[in-house]
Image (cartoon, rainbow, N blue to C red):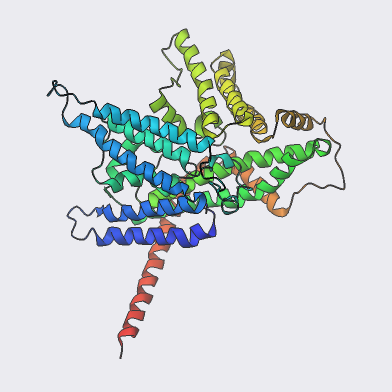
Amino acid sequence: MTFTDWRFLFVFLPVVLGLHFLAARLTSRGAADGRLRFDVANWILVAGGLAFLAVGAGRFAAVLGGAAAVLYALGRGIAGAHRRPPAVRPDRISAVPEICFSLAITGSIVLFVFFRRLNPFAGEALLEPAAFGLAAFPAPGLLAPLGLSVFVCHAVSYVTDVHRGEAAAPRNPVHALTYLLLFPFLVVGPIVRFRDVSAHLAARQVGMAAFAYGVRRFTIGLAKAWLIAETLAPPAALAFSMPAGALDAAHAWLGLACFTLQIYFALSGYADMAIGLGRMLGFRLPEHFARPHGFWRRWAMTLVAWFDAYVRLPLRPDVGRTAGRETQAVLSLLLLFLLIALWHGPGWPLLLWGAWHGAAVALERTPWGAVLARLPAPVRHGYVLLVVAAGWILFRADSPADAVVFVRALAGLGAQPSLNDPLPLTGGVQIALAVGAVAAAPLLPAVSRWSVTVDSIATALQMIVTAAALFVWTRLLRQGRRP
């Protein structure tokens, strides 16, 4: 049950949203400040997150639920360090907060390593491939085990922000569980820092305008993942699965273009849907994908920010740094991509992909970066596109030998084109390629000015539908009361 599954769209999401807002409205009557209270409504979100996990990961949902409960208890223990500062009572400094913090960080890492590398549920898959459509998802390693990578990132953020005093540990366990198990970002993110949403867990404002924006953002993401990414999945899979003797240049370039657009629109589409769902629920989630052509700085931005905040990698080698600091920053950038690759799963493809992009980013810190900055924008975008496309070959190929064969085919050194084996360019694939190429290019900056108009139209439609539903409901009630 991914965000594009009909069960999520027509059963899970309407039920969770309806119960969430109904509970918030019923429990907020008489509130003086006009803000809704979400103590009961958050329990519905927690239950929805566990149900979402249970559909795709089975008993693994209980593991994450138990881990979230333990993290809440450890967070309360860490919060004890801020109740009585050492300057006030220097003779009674407790070691409990530090022990709780160490246990939380160590336990999160052990949880990730154990369940990422080992399957304790013998004979039970942590993911249902049929339910999650892994044939169409370009990076299935991001989904299995479902929610684990995002959960661990949020676990580290929760206990670290509490330990640093940047956010207070909630007394009500439902608020901590909501942050750790909120279903919108359990698939592939974005990664949300606890300090940024802690104030909105107990009380937040949800209006028609925000809900309309969420609907628009969710619809855009759904179109990206469903209409473009899933349409381009079959030709991409066909090109990369062809034997070495049958792969020609046309198939290779078509497959590479389809896979490059597929993986961008799938991942950015899921991020858009998560941000839209968060806005519907009253949360402002950070942007995860900003520009398709700015790969190294605009993809997975929240994950890079998480590494910067909690792993303390010096990722910004800019002004005022010595040569030694500059070298350290370059090495940190290379290490960052290797860590991201290891984070998403073992194996040579991800490691080579991480090393390739880490080296490309590090190369920009050399004099080549200054030369690149003086080139025209189309040339810079073309350079980035070529480097990114080469990285996807390493990411998608099954072995280094397959990657070499694919590169040779791109250069025209593979098989000769066969008239009896036409390219899988159906009408839907051609439309998806054209729309994807235009949408991924930096050619439509003026489209954003129409977002307010679209939001206004969506708000008006929601008000019309709501008024019509209330009218029909009241008419039915009146007819039912007649003798």
Q: Is residue 376 visible?
A: no
Q: Nearer the viewer, residue 315 or 108?
A: 108
Task: State the residue lying farthest toward the front.
Answer: 122
Percent position of residue 360, x then y:
59, 22
Q: Nearer the viewer, residue 133 or 301?
A: 133
What residue is shown at x 18% (from left), y 59% (from top)? 30
Percent position of residue 319, x then y:
43, 15
What residue is shown at x 44% (from left), y 48% (from top)? 61
Task: State the residue lying farthest toward the top.
Answer: 323
The correct choice, above or below, for 52 with respect to 73 in the image is below
The correct choice, above or below, for 211 with respect to 112 in the image is below
Query: On the rendered structure, is 100 left or right of 8?
Result: left
Q: Is residue 262 visible?
A: yes
- Residue 261's image quarter? top right
What residue is shown at x 71% (from left), y 40% (from top)? 255
Q: Quadrant of the C terminus?
A: bottom left
What residue is shown at x 56% (from left), y 14% (from top)? 366
Query: On the rendered structure, is 8 left or right of 89?
Result: right
Count of picture labels: 0
Q: Nearer the viewer, residue 207 or 29?
A: 29
Percent position of residue 352, x then y:
62, 26
Percent position of residue 5, x then y:
54, 56
- Residue 167's image quarter? top left
